[in-house]
Image (cartoon, grey):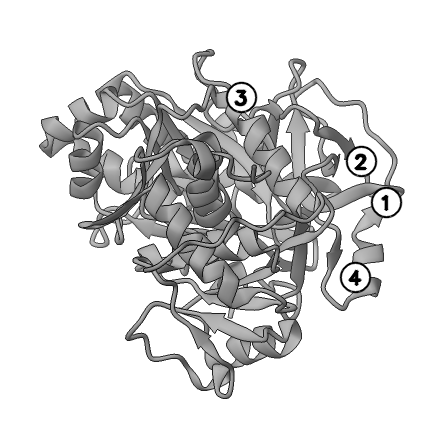
Amino acid sequence: MPQLFPALETAGHAPALRFGDRSLDYAELRAAASATAVRLAGAGRVALWATPTLESAVGAVAALVAGVPLVPVNPGSGARELAHVVADSAPELVLAAPGVELPEAFAGLPVVHPDLTPEGPLPDLPEEPGDEAPALVIYTSGTTGPPKGAVLPRRAIRATLDSLAEAWQWTGDDVLVHGLPLFHVHGLVLGVLGPLRRGGSLRHLGRFSPEGVREELAGGATVLFGVPTMYHRLAEALPADPALGKALAGARLLVSGSAALSRRDHEAITGATGQQVVERYGMTETLMNTSVRPGGPPQPGSVGTPLDGVELRLVDDGGRPVEAGDGETLGEIQVKGPNLFTEYLGRPDATEAAFDQGWFRTGDMATQDADGSVRIVGRRSTDLIKSGGYKIGAGEIENVLLEHPAVADAAVTGEPDPDLGEAVVAWIVPRDPAAPPSAQELADHVAGQLAPYKRPRTVRLREALPRNDMGKIMKKALRD
């Protein structure tokens, strides 16, 4: 029986995957995956041109069934980034849907189109490799240099999905709906492999829309995954769409991840539907670390407590553990657990630098409440501002700015200041461009809810903020 997907052998004709009007049940998925796996056998690594298609999902399952490490590739990658990923990972072939025109970076590589309707006798599923065998090589966002390939073992996938099942009461009866891309942890590991490990099903929207979410939840889907940009669009659509509110209210679980969801959107969705959006925290290198548990009190701004098997601590600038629990003491998150990656592909130097005596240095700055709940304030590299002798997390200021009625979107950065060292700068998208909030108004708003030294000293207005595919603000692009 397969270690990662036992339902391939046991679930029969229960629904497994649906993309638009195309679908596979578990028996059909087993046939497609096993037939495709035979064509991958013996390869060192294979790339996946990760379009939001049934072929991409089958290709990913086939590679895992075959025991061949899979490199999901973002179809939106620029030529330079794509050339780096292909050269660095050195795949021996590429999985892609039929009819796709692949870029020059894949020239010369054999192309395998996953066979969704194989004919003839089916091969037996091969015996899967051990827990430490590499399963995925997922490339980081490359904010501090060229993207690095994080090698994720089969053990990490199993551990993360099983701990989430425990935290969320995720079962084979659940029907997941999402419109996330399939080249990253959120959309692929959680959003495709997650339901298949449980024996449940996935309905992928292809392209996210509030109307698509409404239709699927009203049609029997029980769980929704999304990023904050998606939940913001849902919150904006709710007042004019009572049917959307009814559909969201009927869901068993709403989960947001990949970036922080604003308090305003939390409250808008809860107020209209009675549902709380659950936030969780993970990284490419660690998969999932923490989650809010469904059914508890509202926790806007919190990513919850550590998942089963995950150890978490906060450390100061010297790497010393800090006394957490007051909700105020700021430290960098470090984690241990079976959910961690094994190495950066071909980068022993970067791998060694990423660990502190077995603890992974996440680079995320946070506080921790008395109950163990973690509140992330930003990345050490881009979101930690040292101003006037204080350490300030950009994330908490952004959350407060987003509560101002005249602010549609906000980001916070630091910039050199001869007096303070760094000054807090707010980048604001006004709700009404003809009547933007004043700098003094926003400074007073922040100072009224946080310590006065956290108020923005400069406000810069923008029509929009640059975001990546997962909804995260690209602060380097913002400064540039």
The residue that mark 3 highlights is 167
Q: CA distance from mark 4 to mark 3?
A: 32 Å
Q: CA distance from mark 1 to mark 3?
A: 28 Å
Q: Amino acid at mark 2?
A: Val
**Mark found first going from the N terminus, 1 or 4:** 4
Q: Callout 1: 10 Å neighbours few (<14), some, many (20+)?
A: few
In front: 377, or 106? Answer: 106
Q: Above or below — where is 307 with respect to 453?
A: above
Q: CA distance from mark 2 to mark 4?
A: 20 Å
The residue that mark 4 highlights is 350
Is disc 3 placed on a helix, strand or loop? helix
Q: CA distance from mark 2 to mark 3?
A: 26 Å
Can residue 78 be seen in this snapshot? Answer: yes
Q: Callout 2: 10 Å neighbours few (<14), some, many (20+)?
A: many
Q: CA distance from mark 2 to mark 1?
A: 11 Å
Q: Are marks 2 and 1 in contact (CB under 8 Å)?
A: yes
Q: Amino acid at mark 1?
A: Asp
Q: CA distance from mark 1 to mark 4?
A: 12 Å
The residue that mark 1 highlights is 356
Is disc 4 placed on a helix, strand or loop? helix
The residue that mark 2 highlights is 315
**Mark found first going from the N terminus, 4 or 3:** 3
**Mark found first going from the N terminus, 1 or 3:** 3
Foreground label between 2 and 4: 4
**Mark found first going from the N terminus, 2 or 1:** 2
Residue sitting at 78 percent across and 52 percent down?
354
Residue sitting at 20 percent across and 35 percent down?
216
